[in-house]
Image: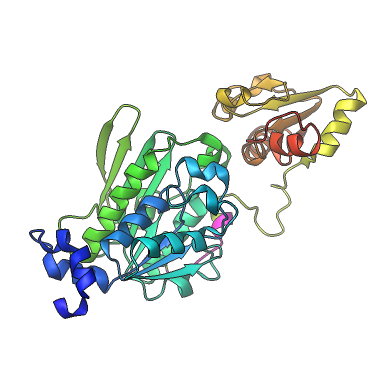
Amino acid sequence: MSNIFSTEELSRYNRHLILPDFGIEGQTKLKQSKVLVIGSGGLGSPLLLYLAAAGIGTIGIVDFDVIDESNLQRQVLFGVESVGQPKVEAAKKRLLSLNPHIDIITYNERFSTENALQIAKGYDVIADGTDNFPTRYLVNDVSVILNIPNVHASIFRFEGQVSVFNYKNGATYRDLFPEPPAPDLVPNCAEGGVLGVLPGIIGSIQANEVIKVLTGIGEPLSGRLFIFDAKWFSTRTLKIIKNPNLKPVTALINYEQFCGVQPLENDKSNEMKSMTVTEFKALQDSGEDFQLIDVREAHELEISTLGGLHIPMGDVPMSVNQIEDEKKVVIQCRTGGRSGAIVNFLEATHGMTNCYNLEGGINAYAREIDTSLTVY
């Protein structure tokens, strides 16, 4: 089998080739494998670096985002020279500079119901490093329909999780989470924060699981969920039981609707009331009595603030009695995501129709109304 490797490759992969239970056979399996990575951000950065370095023959990268300066705190695949560039293009350039003996296929588009099966077809493993529930369910269902193992990882604040789903008919993501959590109270990393080194740790573990699945070495995390807490350096491994009564996945669906992020078609009940920052400034200047609520975390107030009542997003369900119900209530956060979820939550669960989401949050206000405020 060594004749499929060039002299340069044999030298490059020497530490694998002399590794017991790995050797030329394991390296050959890697070279002949195709791995599709969904997301090239915090988790995707270390994952892609180690898969490329290990010699995965073909790596597909799906990401529609561009590099922002705020990414560099944890997305070690990129440098300041890449800010503003499409992530997939910058990633491809970096990975080929690391290992020119592999193929990189880029998909500069959102992984969606419309394109997911076409993109994923022909790959041996899907590695999911996304930060939202609709895409996680989509990746799961694609892996089930195409019968491809799904190496999953997720991070939030100080905690990371890794598992291998749909491995040899093993447990899937839907066995772990049959129903998505309420979208109103689930911030993503951009809203809740993440320790910069955490995706490096978890992404490396994810890469390890991909290599194990492809080579057949060791025991993958199938039927198990590994949880790591970086703050207290504690680990747990939970068993995932395969549900025999779970409805089979035969087709893709609208995952935004399934996760409650997008209202059902023709359903006006979930339409969110909102106002632009220009409209909010007019409200401020009008002298009308209203209530402003900031649902960001306490540390964000130190960066910039519009004043008002501070109720962190997670505390809103226990603090509804502090929210006025007979005057306009404007709810704001950093960019409008968390505040929009809270507006929906208050209307759906408490019938409060007087609440408005500040579109674009305090960042939009800082850009368009008060440039003395800090955009972050």
The residue closer to the viewer here, 93 or 286, is 93
Q: Report the side of 42 relative to 151 (left or right).
A: right
In the image, what residue occupies the spot 35% across and 28% down? 231
In this view, which residue lies farthest toward the bottom?
3
Where is residue 32, by image quadrant? bottom left
Magenta highlight on residue 251: yes
Above or below — where is 113 with respect to 205? below
**In this rendering, does residue 248 appear at all?**
no
* Quadrant for the N terminus in the image: bottom left
Above or below — where is 270 with respect to 112? above
The residue closer to the viewer here, 121 or 264, is 121
In this view, which residue lies farthest toward the right?
286
The residue closer to the viewer here, 339 or 145, is 339
x, y percent for residue 212:
21, 59
x, y percent for residue 56:
29, 66
In this view, which residue lies farthest toward the left?
20
The residue closer to the viewer here, 334 or 259, is 334
Where is residue 290, by image quadrant? top right
Magenta highlight on residue 126: no
x, y percent for residue 232:
31, 26
x, y percent for residue 275:
79, 40
The chief SS type of the magenta part is loop
In the image, what residue occupies the spot 47% across and 75% down? 118
**In this rendering, does residue 5 appear at all?**
yes
The colour scheme used here is rainbow
In the image, what residue occupies the spot 25% across and 52% down? 223
- For the record, the magenta segment spans 250-257
Q: Report the side of 60 relative to 9 (left or right).
A: right
